[in-house]
Amino acid sequence: MRPMDTVIMNRMSPPLGLYTIVSILRNDHKVIVQNENIEEIEYDMPDIVGITVSLDVLPAAIAIASRFISKYGVLAIEHIGRR
């Protein structure tokens, strides 16, 4: 059984794409990475929000995105499916 098919999944690291963006931006911007499985999401006024999600937690990601949309009104979505 794969770890992502068990309760361990909640503690696994997010995909590296998010951390690649963080490494590019961190010298010129304040960057905060939040994981809803570890801590409660802070919805303070961000300049930009990036959400990395897998299909199994899509409803939670939609709820988080919806809260940012209701507070700040803008959202861009990019979906990259698995092949």
Image (cartoon, rainbow, N blue to C red):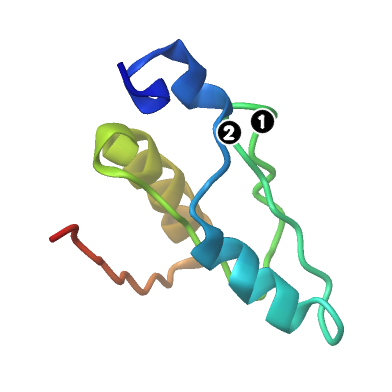
Q: Residue reaching furthest bottom? A: 28
Q: Are marks 2 and 1 in contact (CB under 8 Å)?
A: yes
Which residue does the numbered mark 2 point to in the structure image? Answer: 36
Q: Is residue 49 above or below residue 4?
A: below
Splitting the image into 4 quarters, where does residue 78 fall?
bottom left
Side of 65 where 55 appears, left or right? left
Q: Is residue 4 above or below residue 49?
A: above
Find residue 2 and report its horizontal and vertical position in percent.
34, 23
Which residue does the numbered mark 1 point to in the structure image? Answer: 40
Marker disc for residue 62: none
Splitting the image into 4 quarters, where does residue 46 fall?
bottom right
Side of 73 where 82 appears, left or right? left
At x 29%, y 40%, the residue is 58
Q: Secondary structure at mark 2?
A: loop
Find residue 55 and report its horizontal and vertical position in percent.
24, 41
Q: Is residue 57 above or below residue 50?
A: above
Distance Cα–Cα, label 2 vs label 1? 6 Å
Tell me the amino acid under the disc marked 2: Glu
Tell me the amino acid under the disc marked 1: Glu
Quadrant of the snapshot with the N terminus:
top left
Q: Residues within 10 Å of mark 1 (few under 14, many from 20)?
A: few
Side of 72 where 57 appears, left or right? left
At x 84%, y 87%, the residue is 28
Find residue 14 and report its horizontal and vertical position in percent.
53, 47
